[in-house]
Amino acid sequence: MLAPEEVQRMQADALAAIAAATGLDALKAVRLAHAGDRAPITLANAEIGALPPAARADAGKRVGTARAAIREALAARQVELEAERDQRVLIEEAVDVTLPWDRGLEGARHPVTIMSERLADVFVDMGYEVAEGPEVEAEWYNFDALNFPPDHPARETQDTIFVEGPDPAVRSGVVLRTHTSPVQIRSLLTRPLPLYVVSPGKCFRSDALDATHSPVFHQIECLAVDEGLTMADLRGAINAFVEAVFGEGLQTRLRPDFFPFTEPSADVSMQCHVCRAESTKPGADPCRVCRSQGWVEIAGCGMVNPRVLVACGIDPDRYSGFAFGLGIERSVMIRHGVADIRDTFDGDVRFSRALGMEA
Ligand code: DAH
């Protein structure tokens, strides 16, 4: 076992196995087999003590040299294999920091918000101020001051969401405002005359949800009170916003209607901005937006009822005013040909994106 050829063979076997080890685990096994406690060279080393003293030094030197060569080869291969592993890990576990980071969707304003701001901007450009009021509103502002009689059907719980009352003992209940018109009263009571205000905001009615009704929706209200205002001024204001929002050259039409807070009152229609009344001609394609009527109803309006002015302490012989109000979801639906109001608040980003999100 301690013969020179034997020792050399052990060394050669070990070095060959070391060179053949292709991974750190394999090298570990090689170390155990060729340098461990039960490796041939280790066992040979243990045999040295049993040799006659004269032979020990020589055998010790050969075995020692072989063991040192094996140790060195193991250490060198260990370094090599670790370097290889590190190299591989760097490639396999690399994080590609060059991935695009700017492809996420950016948040943007909702089509209802955009419409609301666009409408308000039209009036702000004409010198109106934006006025806001509370969504939880005193019944007095929402109805009484607007000349709704106490038994008006709109006050009934089927239309109005009451927060307090209605209670005959309580003079004025508290409601979720059913329209933005109470902001007219709040403005008339707190702002100096002449007064030009525009009021966008959320409204509530206990309507069942369907394609055209929602218990929560938005309106925008316009109110002007000044000396000498007439229905011609009302028409001018209406034409201005129709032009700004729906396009130039669209005719508007007023037809008699009734609202307690305006006298006279009218409903406002505009010529259909999609077919421009072409769909009413015989043999023409039908129009989805105006249902081939040629006109679309867009707002309620009128001259401020003198009773409203009186309720706010304003002299109706000196001042007159006009007002109108419209639904913002409805405006979005008309403008973009949306058939179902639920699309406006379902929260599906594809709806907003299709209507052109603005930052
Ligand atoms: N407040 C009315 C409604 O919700 C809309 C309205 C009609 C507002 C006529 C007005 C107006 O200012 O003059 O149905």
Image: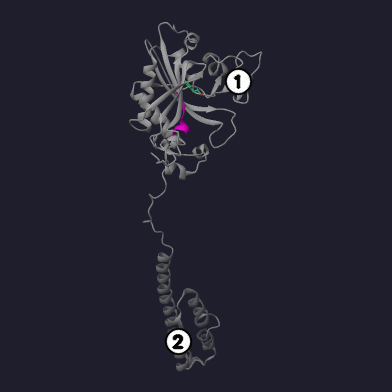
Give the residue displayed 40% in from the left and 70% down from the top: 83
From the image, which quarter does the C terminus lie in? top left
Amino acid at the residue labelled 2: Gln
Give the residue displayed 46% in from the left and 90% down from the top: 9
Element under disc 2: helix
Give the residue displayed 55% in from the left and 17% down from the top: 143
| Residue 128 can be seen in this image | no
Give the residue displayed 39% in from the left and 19% down from the top: 234
Give the color scheme: rainbow, by chain, secondary structure or one colour. Answer: one colour
- The answer to if 327 sits in the magenta stretch is yes
In the rendered image, which residue does mark 1 sit on?
153
Element under disc 1: helix
Residue 156 found in image quarter: top right
Please give left or right for residue 347 compared with residue 357 in the image.
right
Q: Does label 2 point to a residue whose CB lies under 8 Å from ligand 1?
A: no
**Which segment did they paint magenta?**
325-331
Q: Which mark is residue 265?
A: none
N-term mark: 1 or 2: 2
**Mark 1 and mark 2: span between their CA atoms?**
108 Å
Residue 256, position as x, y percentages in the image: 47, 20
Amino acid at the residue labelled 1: Pro
- Front residue of 147 and 30: 147
Please give left or right for residue 67 compared with residue 50 in the image.
left
In the rendered image, which residue does mark 2 sit on?
11
| Residue 9 can be seen in this image | yes
Residue 43, position as x, y percentages in the image: 54, 86
Q: Does label 1 point to a residue whose CB lies under 8 Å from ligand 1?
A: no
Task: Give the number of marks.
Answer: 2
Identify whether 8 is placed above or below 302: below
